[in-house]
Amino acid sequence: MGTAVEVVSDTRKRRGAATQNIAATWFTEHGWPWAQSTGAGRTGSDITGLPGLACEVKARRGFSPLAWIRQAQAGKGDLPFVILRCDGQGPAATADWPVILRLADFTDLLHEAGYGDRPDPP
């Protein structure tokens, strides 16, 4: 049997991998049929099959949104975002998992959806 640190690390890895799989399944069921988890701990987007998107998935207690957004930006997608599975949110609550994105990207999405008035170009 491993040390307490190894057990906690293994538990976190399993929860991270499970969270990525749940998120990939969500996307598969909601319009991205090729969405797949890349597996916890790998570099690049945590979910592939989302053209133009760079998805980072987190299932942890620590809160480092700027670092996570930077990780998502390294995924080279047009729209970097982070899916956050908070404590107490199991698979049945997937629709309630928060998503974090940059304010500029959020504003662009709102404009594309017909909200607000786009400013005139300079």
Image (cartoon, rainbow, N blue to C red):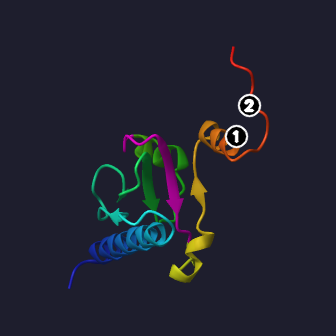
| Residues under numbered marks 1 and 2 in contact, where contact means CB atoms less than 8 Å apart | yes
Q: Residue at x 64, y 38 (%)?
A: 108
Q: Which residue is disc 2 drawn over?
A: 118
- Numbered badge on residue 111: 1
Where does the magenta region start and end?
Answer: 74-86
Magenta region includes residue 75: yes
Q: Please, is residue 30 above or below residue 46 in the view?
A: below
Magenta region includes residue 64: no
User: Quarter of the image holding residue 13?
Assistant: bottom left
Q: Residue at x 51, y 68 (%)?
A: 30
User: Quarter of the image holding residue 28?
Assistant: bottom left
Q: Amino acid at mark 1?
A: His
Q: Please, is residue 51 above or below residue 18 in the view?
A: above
How many badges with numbers are in the image?
2
Q: Residue at x 36, y 57 (%)?
A: 49
- Numbered badge on residue 95: none
User: In terms of depth relative to the viewer, which is nearer, 17 or 110?
Assistant: 110
Q: Residue at x 53, y 80 (%)?
A: 90
* Residue that lies at the very extreme toward the right in this rendered image: 116
